[in-house]
Image (tube, rainbow, N blue to C red):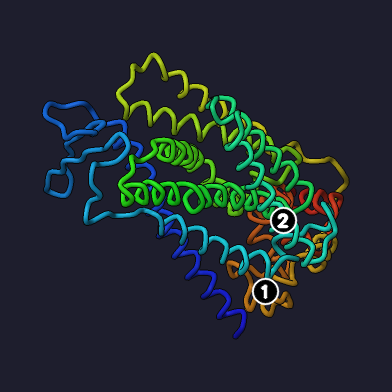
Amino acid sequence: MEVFLGEWVNLLLRWAHLIVGIGWIGTSFYFMALDYSLSKRERMNPGVLGATWQVHGGGFYHVEKYTVAPAQLPPDLHWFQWEAYLTWVTGFGLMIVQYYLHANAYLIDPSVLPLNAWQAIAISLGSILTGWAIYEVLCRSAISQNAPLLALCVFALIVGASVFYTHVYSGRGAFVHVGALTGSIMATNVFAVIIPNQKKLIAQMLRGETPDPRHGAIGKQRSIHNNYLTLPVLVMMVAPHYPFLFSHSHAWMVVALILIAGALIRHYLNRTDAGDDWKKFGWTAPVAVVALLAAIYVTSPRAPRDGGAVSDTQALAISHKHCVMCHAAKPTHEAFQEAPKNMTLESISDLEKYAQLIYVQTVQNKAMPLGNQTVMTDDERAALGRWLRALR
């Protein structure tokens, strides 16, 4: 019953995470596009930077943006903050349910670094906090005045974190932590900088003071950071479903290439919304494609190892040693009440039925066993691979 209820909690958190995440990313995309669609018009209100007309849902909208703030505080003011807060809260809830409560299965790989569950969780919390602190120092330093240099430093920070995580956690755990770190930076930008700075502007207006444009400029900078990180963080968060991304020694390089491709795709879309001359930003599209092609090359499967023939008995012994704790009619693994994907691997006929999936997940991607809890060796994977290939 506990496993059953845990699965429901996992599902509801994941569902909520998707809903609020779509809302957060959607507003980021919309307001960036809105900013770029603004233009000077005749007879604009004093202090207005630009305005735009938009049509949607059978109606017309007239939107104005002030350079700093209107002369008087409007009676109705809509805030965009809870989408970001709830995305982080539900994401962290998923981290607890999926990775902290089942650290030995999803977070720890003894062949990478033997850890106790509490150690893995402590490193997780400490590294996310440290990564955010480094980012905050960078944004508050003189480097922040040079946008390209700051972007390069943030890129180096995330790639450096990915190198660290791949030497601490399982491939699955490493990638999800890169996403968690990046998402935490983005959510904290909203919670600790963007919203507080907006409140400072409002407080100045209520005191009858002229709003300081510096607060808005800082908030805008963090908002732009969030916008350019959205596409890469989405890949990091779904990466656990695609083991080929992290089942090799160059996983950190995949992170770097995804950051480059995602940021360039976002830049291409932003400059398109701004109506810039394609000649000024068109180069980003082919470079993004090259980065993605490089990622495909890095993650491509390597040639199988040669060796002698493997008998049915040997193949079944490997399965019983490393697979049936989960993939059995009655699993003995604490996280499962029934075999994942209803795959039982207790007989030769079972192995033959799921041969392709076994080969991809166990031999090629090394994603199974979960967390390599049974410490399956490369020799065992190679032997199982030879037996599976012989079936073809």
Residue under label 1, please give it: 335
Q: Give 144 or 129, whichever is nearer the viewer.
A: 144
Instruction: Give x and y (percent) for residue 315.
Output: 80, 60
Q: Report the number of numbered marks.
A: 2
At 46% from the left and 38% from the top, the residue drawn is 218
Q: Amino acid at mark 1?
A: Ala
Residue 272 x, y percent position in the rendering: 34, 27
| Residue 210 in which image quadrant | top left
Instruction: Please state, as top left, top right, bottom left or bottom right, where the N terminus lies in the image.
Output: bottom right
**Relative to 235, 320 lies left or right:** right
Query: What secondary structure is found at the residue carrying circle 1?
Result: loop
Q: In the figure, 302 relative to 7: above or below?
A: above
Q: Earlier in the sequence, mark 2 or mark 1?
A: 2
List the single residue furthest toward the bottom: 1
Please tell me which residue is depicted at 53% across the width and 51% down the height of the picture: 188
> Who's the residue at 51% across and 51% down the image?
192
In this view of the protein, which residue sits in the foreground, 34 or 162? 34
Q: CA distance from mark 2 to mark 1?
A: 26 Å
Q: Is residue 211 left or right of residue 12?
A: left
Give, as a three-letter code, the residue at label 2.
Answer: Gly
Mark 1, residues whose alpha carbon is within 10 Å: few (<14), some, or many (≥20)? Answer: some
Give the camera-side residue of 281 and 350: 281
Q: Rate crowding at label 2 as few (under 14), some (14 to 19) or many (20 or more) other CA atoms within 10 Å.
A: few
Q: Is residue 76 above or below residue 52?
A: below
Does residue 369 appear anywhere in the picture? no
Instruction: Identify the residue position indicated by label 2 in the image.
Output: 126
Q: Judge by depth and name the residue closer to the eye, 47 or 306.
A: 47
Residue 33: % across, % down: 32, 36
* Residue found at the far front of this picture: 208
